[in-house]
Amino acid sequence: MEIITTKNLSKEYPTKNFSKEKILALNNFSFEVQSGEIFGLLGPNGAGKTTLIKILLGITFPTAGEIKIFDKDISNESYKKKVGYLPESHKFPNYLTGEQVLYFFGMLSGMNKTDVKKKSDEYLKLVDMEKWRKTKIKKYSKGMLQRLGLAQSMLNNPELIFLDEPTDGVDPIGRKEIRDILNNLKNEGKTIFLNSHLLSEVELICDRVAILNKGVLVKSGRVDDITAISDNYIFTISEADEKVIHSLLGNFKATISSKNEFYFNTGSIEELNKLIDFLRQNNILIHGILREKNTLENMFINLIENQN
Amino acid sequence: MIFLTLMFSTFREAIAKKIFVGFFAISTLIILVFLFLINVDSIEGMVNMMESSGEEGVKQLVIGFEVAMINISYLLIITFCFISVSSFIPSMLEKGNIDLLLSKPVSRTKIILAKFSGGVFLIFLSLLYLIGFVWLILSSKSGFWHVPFLYSIFWLTLSFAIIYSLIIFIGLISQSSILSIIISLFLVFIVCPVLFFREETIFSLVSNGAAQFVINFFYYVLPKPTDINQITTDMITGSPVKSYMPVYSSVIFMLAALSASILYFKKKDY
């Protein structure tokens, strides 16, 4: 079941106040997020990721296009009762304590006092902020604020959670804990919409991703499909003479990168073995064969570089 | 409940920014000065003299004190209030704060109305403390319990609410507390008094009919806190109120400023 659906979503901003010149932050963006999945939105700075989240949350208005969340138009605020949000560089009122922040935003989410208290206890414990609950947040570190922000986003027991750079400022152990929390939320059937620059993290927890560049959807799909093992093999060999190299290039789909290294692209294991036989017959020593791994990061960088 | 939460967040902000403390410190100082004044020998002597001239003399003295009090409140307290509340909207609009607020199931209209009500209620409580105490001191000292003085709490709060609606509008558009303070103080302490006394001041210099029409136009369109202050003084002194037009037109201005704020806020991207 689709939780979020957008059709031909576009957003134009004037370059300056009252200017007629416009910047296209989103251009005919259509996508869906399925119920119960962790969806990652990727893109370089200024790609339109935060604009998209803000449009989905009614913070910014689209210039054109359709949006449905929980199968309903978002003009009615009521859908936000089932939504949690952790903005990038959020700013809680710094005169409040951690507990008061949760109370304030919990009440604004339409919860009653008893539920807010109960859930605050539960989530402060979950994000390991229990002992700081009565401390004013102006004394919190960035990582602590991020943990509190995460607790705030989960407080109203939302079905859909938007997280904009949730691990920003969090140490590696904290990041692991946040990943675990997100996986637990997924197991509880929650849908998570994640916007992160940390592609290795996205790769670890997201089911599907969409890559956005200059407001345009460049690629989307399952992380497993996008990062599928490539057919590229890296051969490290002893030095070969030019005649052999010439013959290698003539008979196989190989690319020489140096005297001792070449790339070979094939989807066939027979082809690979034929190449090994060829090298052995020509008395070339094979020092190593490495199957290139296509990480999300590699794929992302290649895709964006090609686009630009 | 959401509305009350938002409204009381204004209180919490006022407490955190020491606005409450500042207000109560100033008010308490004024109350203490008042207490001191009515106990000094010369004033005691004046009271005794007025007492000897009968009940009317005491009443006149009390009313005189009350009018002085209203003018102090108008000048000092309202100025302090404008400065204090002018940061409420710009701080709400800060990046990272407004995003979170708008992601909650609260309409933008409700947010503006709650901020407005919170600020007005805050000032109402503060004026209740100041004027209520002064009234108690004056009444217990003189034995003349002059209730119309208490009405000034309402009139001063109304004057504040009218200008606060403008502060909200400027705050939303400019996101600047300083600009809100400058414009509101300029309006209240320069434009409005000049327009209030336009016949005695401007019209004696400008005889051109068209220019006088433009000045009159501004007088009727802009809020009239000086006129409302005059109405309050008239009520306290028992003088007949010439016209309630300044109240009606100022309330219309307030409603227009609030509506414009809501419309702007509802369409604005954050």
Image: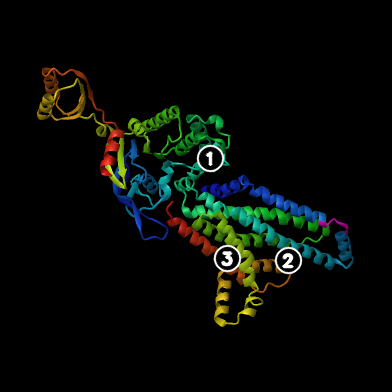
Per the model, the C-alpha gap separating discs 3 and 1 is 36 Å
Disc 1 marks which residue?
A101
Indicate whether residue B38 is drawn in magenta: yes
Q: Which residues are magenta?
A: B37-41
Which is nearer the eye, A102 or B173? B173
Mark 3 belongs to which amino acid?
Val
Q: Is residue A237 magenta?
A: no
Q: Residue B236 shows which numbered tag?
A: 2
Q: Which quarter of the figure is the N terminus of chain A placed in?
A: top left
Mark nearer the viewer, 1 or 2: 1
In this view, the mark in front (3 or 1): 1
- Which amino acid, mark 1? Val
Q: Mark 3 — residue? A: B251
Q: Nearer the viewer, residue B35 or B214?
A: B214
Mark 1 chain: A
Drawn side of residue A155 relative to residue B129, left or right: left
In the picture, measured across the screen, residue B237 lies left or right of residue B161, that is right
Q: Quadrant of residue A240?
A: top left
Residue A1 shows in the view: no
Q: Residue at 86% across / 62% down in the picture?
A: B47
